[in-house]
Amino acid sequence: MLLGVNQGLCWSTTVIMKIDLVGPKQRGLAMGLNEFAGYLAVSLSALATGYIASVYALRPQPFYLGVVFALAGLLISIFFVRDTSDHVRLEADQHAQSRAADDPDPRADLSFAQVLLVTSWKDRDLFSASQAGLVNNLNDGMVWGLLPIFLATSGLNTVRIGVVAAIYPGVWGIGQLFTGALSDRVGRKWMIVAGLWTQAAGIGLILMGREFVLWALAAALMGFGTALVYPTLLAAVSDVAHPNWRASAVGVYRLWRDGGYAVGALLAGILADLLGMHWAIGVIALITAASGVIVATVMAETLPKKTSPVNRQENGQP
């Protein structure tokens, strides 16, 4: 529970602060760097603690690293990190100045309950991003829950199962270095669509595969699809949300996105029990593809230089 509280406070806030700092032109780059750094740290920490555990013991030696990391993060935050609220106020002022004096933005000041409704349902762009985030982590929950069992029952040995499982987050983590920045150039919408459909193709290839090479390729496809989607969705939410309540909108989006882990794990387990693993994996692939269709048909392009208030109104956006 304490680690969960830390995740909500520290990880969400680092995301929001980077969005505040970079402004509208480099949100994708900032999110890509943030997610790359985080998942690289997870990978390296797992490697280091695994080595320490193999040399010494499972407890307490590997946990000393966690204590050191927590203290280092605390000291860095105290002495080097500065609050970004001034950047938010400046951006909000610029946003207000861009509108006519007699035409104030009706969404400049929303309560949290209103932000929850707008992000979850009322705004088509934010709804599209929220459901895509949920489905992205839904299929991720399936990958970690069902994939190793599926591969084991298909005759793959433990070492090769580990390789397939490692390819997925490896491609995902490294890919975000480039995909986030790319979304600042080409736009958010179609990268999200492409990412979801690439994930669906990778999940489908798992079912069609009969040998290690195809399953490794499937894991790489899923990782690349997630790299296209993960930082781009955060950037898209930031594009749409007003600076005054952007942090709340990111929090609501992350509620839906990270809730997908639990939904995916439970759904995959229930479907596997009722229909078998092949059907469970196939249904998850179809859900992922359908999520891409929703983004393609409902979401407008959110990248500031590729859209405008007029474009959003023409697409039924407030």
Image: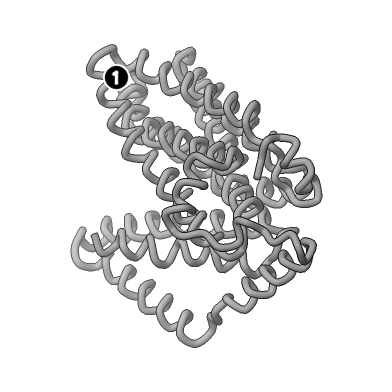
x, y percent for residue 138: 41, 34
Image side of residue 12 versus residue 49, left or right: right
Decide: is 204 above or below 109.
above
x, y percent for residue 221: 57, 30
Query: How many neighbours does mark 1 have within 10 angstroms: few (below 14), some (14-19), or many (20 or more)?
Result: some
Screen quadrant of the N terminus: bottom left
x, y percent for residue 30: 64, 60
The residue that disc 1 covers is 271
Quarter assignment of residue 97: bottom right
Quarter assignment of residue 198: top right
Closer to us: 310 or 270: 310
Screen quadrant of the C terminus: top right
Q: Residue at x 75, y 51 (%)?
A: 304
The residue at the far bottom in this view is 79
Q: Residue at x 80, y 45 (%)?
A: 306
Decide: is 167 above or below 269.
below
Image side of residue 304 versus residue 216, left or right: right
Closer to us: 186 or 128: 128
Image side of residue 318 versus residue 110, left or right: right
x, y percent for residue 54: 27, 55
The reply to whether residue 31 is in sight is no
